[in-house]
Image: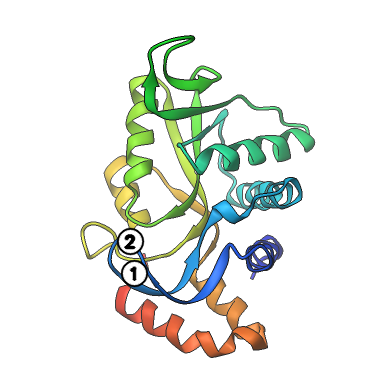
Amino acid sequence: MLPHQQRFLELALARDALRFGEFTLKSGRVSPYFFNAGRFDSGAALAELGNCYADALDASGLAFDMLFGPAYKGIPLATALAVALAARGRDLPLAFNRKEAKSHGEGGSLIGAPLRGRVLIVDDVITAGTAVREAIALIRESGAQVCGIVVALDREERGQSGTSSASRELRDEFGIAVHAIAGLDALLGFAERRPELSLHRAALLQYRERYGCRD
């Protein structure tokens, strides 16, 4: 496990963003763990999370010109990453969208910098990929290029097709790679090293056997 993955999972556990038990997901699947990026709800937590994103991107070698955060959870995540990158000497433009277009004031559904160049989408988790698809369409309609997607956690599960992971489906459909701070394999390794989490490891393995998808 890479150091930034370890830091991210420890942070998620400490902030109660990562929980273990029995959770029914939007997909209807019953999962032994749940990830809620909304629990990174303080300046210190977001600062550390932004650094984890930045480290993951450094490891990926991905080239990008600006950041885009899909509403709603992607907004603070992209902002945290922008601040982390600026602290490292790279001040990048940032944009995000509204769920509903605004008819007064500046109007429209986009806020922030104009969408130009190679745009990196920043989000919390890849499951079905619905929100990411909407973001891709919006960015392309603006004439910019989606160069990649970065998420905090890739659940590494079968997507809409039922045969490939959601990350692989996005790559096949749009030619866009998904990068993650951590995935299910890292989570399994993390649980194995933490005595208080070891009792959940069998359920995690069973869940991966049933719904997991290795690309």
Measured as percent of width and height from the top left, residue 171 is found at 34, 48
Q: Neighbour class for label 1 at 10 Å: few (<14), some, many (≥20)? A: some
Which label sits on residue 151?
none
Q: Amino acid at mark 1?
A: Cys
Q: Amino acid at mark 2?
A: Ser
Please give left or right for residue 169 compared with residue 199 in the image: left
Q: How is the image coloured?
A: rainbow
What residue is rendered at 37% in x and 21% in y? Answer: 101
Above or below 213: residue 91: above
Q: Neighbour class for label 2 at 10 Å: few (<14), some, many (≥20)? A: many
Please give left or right for residue 39 compared with residue 132 in the image: right
What residue is rendered at 43% in x and 12% in y? Answer: 107
Tell me if I can see residue 175 in this picture.
no
Query: Which quarter of the picture shows residue 139?
Result: top left
Between 90 and 23, the one lying in front of the other is 23
Above or below 155: residue 130: above
Query: Which quarter of the picture shows residue 43?
Result: top right
Between 144 and 10, the one lying in front of the other is 10
Which label sits on residue 165?
2
First in sequence: mark 2 or mark 1?
2
Measured as percent of width and height from the top left, residue 20 is found at 52, 76
Q: Secondary structure at mark 1?
A: loop
Q: Which residue is mark 1?
A: 213
Q: Secondary structure at mark 2?
A: loop
Residue contact between numbered discs 2 and 1, judged by CB atoms under 8 Å: yes
Measured as percent of width and height from the top left, residue 116 is found at 49, 20
What residue is rendered at 71% in x and 49% in y? Answer: 42
